Image (spheres, rainbow, N blue to C red):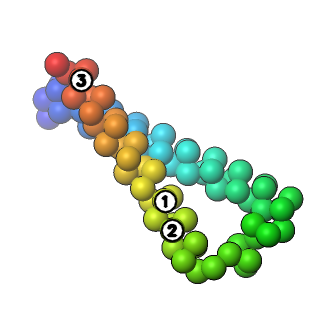
């Protein structure tokens, strides 16, 4: 693997890792808020909202991975 490819892969990987940390933080904040505001408890929300939440949680690491990839491309140029 060339140095350029290594830089791009590590940048994309760090972006995905950052996205996972953001997901964990968002989930933690939601759990704390839902314990204080009973209307936000998971059992009170409709199923479509849960589906949207799962899609949003999956989109965050993908988006940060893309941003990391683009950052890596800028680094090697």
Decide: marks 2, 3 in contact (CB < 8 A)?
no
**Tag 3 or tag 2, which sits nearer the N-term?**
2
- Cα gap from disc 3 to disc 1, whole angstroms: 27 Å
Residue 71 at what x, y percent from top left? 30, 28
Q: Is residue 9 left or right of residue 29?
A: left
Name the residue located 55 percent from the left edge and 45 percent from the top edge.
Answer: 22
Crowding near the residue tagged with mark 3, few <14, some 14–19, many ≥20 C-alpha atoms within 10 Å: few
Element under disc 1: helix
Distance, label 1 to label 2, CA atoms, is 6 Å
Query: Which numbered circle lies on residue 2?
Result: none
Dot 3 falls on a residue whose secondary structure is: helix
Instruction: Check disc 2 and report its element: helix, strand or loop.
Output: helix
Q: Do the residues bearing badges 3 and 1 touch, measured as CB atoms within 8 Å?
A: no
Q: Which of the 4 image quadrants contains residue 7?
A: top left
Of residues 46 and 6, the one nearer the viewer is 46
For the C terminus, the quadrant is: top left
Residue 38 in sight from this viewpoint: yes
Residue pointed to by mark 1: 56
User: Which residue carries the number 2 mark?
Assistant: 52
Q: Residues within 10 Å of mark 1 (few under 14, many from 20)?
A: few
Q: Quadrant of residue 47?
A: bottom right
Decide which of tag 3 and tag 1 comes sooner along the chain.
Answer: 1
State if disc 2 and disc 1 touch (CB < 8 Å). yes
Whole-number angstrom distance, CA of label 2 to CA of label 3: 33 Å
Say left or right for 66 vs 28: left
- Determine which residue is flagged by label 3: 74
Of all residues, the one furthest to the left in this rendering is: 2
Horizontal and vertical percent position of residue 25: 63, 47
Residue 44 picture quarter: bottom right
State the image coordinates of residue 37 (x, y, percent, origin top left): 83, 62
**Does residue 13 appear anywhere in the picture?**
no
Q: Residue at x 19, y 21 (%)?
A: 76
């Amino acid at each position: 693997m060339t140095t350029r490819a290594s830089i791009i892969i590590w940048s994309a990987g760090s972006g995905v890792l950052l996205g996972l940390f953001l997901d964990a933080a968002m989930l933690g904040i939601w759990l704390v808020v839902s314990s204080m505001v009973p209307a936000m408890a998971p059992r009170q929300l409709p199923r479509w909202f849960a589906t949207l939440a799962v899609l949003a949680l999956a989109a965050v690491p993908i988006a940060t991975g893309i941003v990391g990839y683009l950052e890596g491309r800028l680094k090697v140029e």
